[in-house]
Amino acid sequence: MSQFAYIRVSTKEQSIDRQILALEPYGIPRKNVFCDHQSGKDFKRPAYQRLLKRLRSDDLLIIKSIDRLGRNYNEILEQWQYITKKIGADILVLDMSLLDTRDREGDLTGTLIADLVLQILAYVAQTERDYIRQRQAEGIAAAKAKGKKLGRIPIEMPEGFEKMCRACKEGRMTTREAAERLGVSHTTFYRRWKRYLDEM
């Protein structure tokens, strides 16, 4: 049996010291410590993929906290099952002792409890995401009912905007030339010009 560790931070500017310190008591060889400086939104991470290729049955993977493994709980469930069931390795999450798939007293208690806890975490995370979306939808509906305009505040167009619009409509100037003269981006001018034409 070999021990491995996985460390992740979102950017190269973030420190991995806290995770390294938590792993020190386990004496994991440096070659068995895999680190990604990348978002946890998915598992397309180079160090993590190399780790999967090294893991074997009865190996132990140690991580500081479950969010170091990833942020997408549906994918965490898939990866957890892949590591513990298909590869046959164990996982220990230091910040949550219940997330430990190692057998306790020779039975499957460790794996069973860890799987249940992970399922609950995934359910809570998914429920919270749904709740946030529901609150956002309710907030938008309430704001619309009060007559509030949502979205970005329109950019105030410089003086001479209508004159430029007429020139473009009459073919005396291109929309790109008009945008340049007004000092705004072509996209902004064109969008506002189309709205101007619709309102004429």
Image (cartoon, helix red, strand yellow):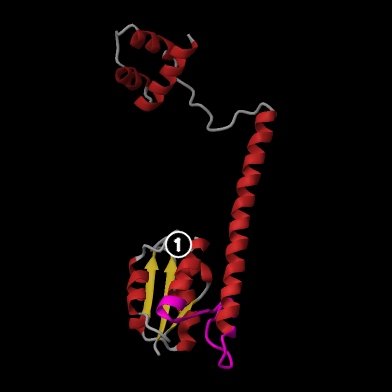
On the image, the x and y values in percent for residue 109 come to 59, 84
Image side of residue 188 versus residue 147, left or right? left
The segment highlighted magenta reads 84-109
Q: Residues within 10 Å of mark 1 (few under 14, many from 20)?
A: some
Image side of residue 134 versus residue 38, left or right? right
Whether residue 161 is visible:
yes
Q: In the picture, which quadrant includes the N terminus? A: bottom left
**Residue visible at 30% across and 12% down in the picture:** 173
Q: How many marks?
A: 1
**Residue visible at 30% across and 8% down in the picture:** 171
Q: Work out which residue is located at the far bottom of the displayed protein and give it.
A: 105
| Helix, strand or loop under label 1 | loop
> Which residue position holds label 1?
40
Q: Is residue 95 magenta?
A: yes
Q: Is residue 20 magenta?
A: no
Image side of residue 145 versus residue 16, left or right? right
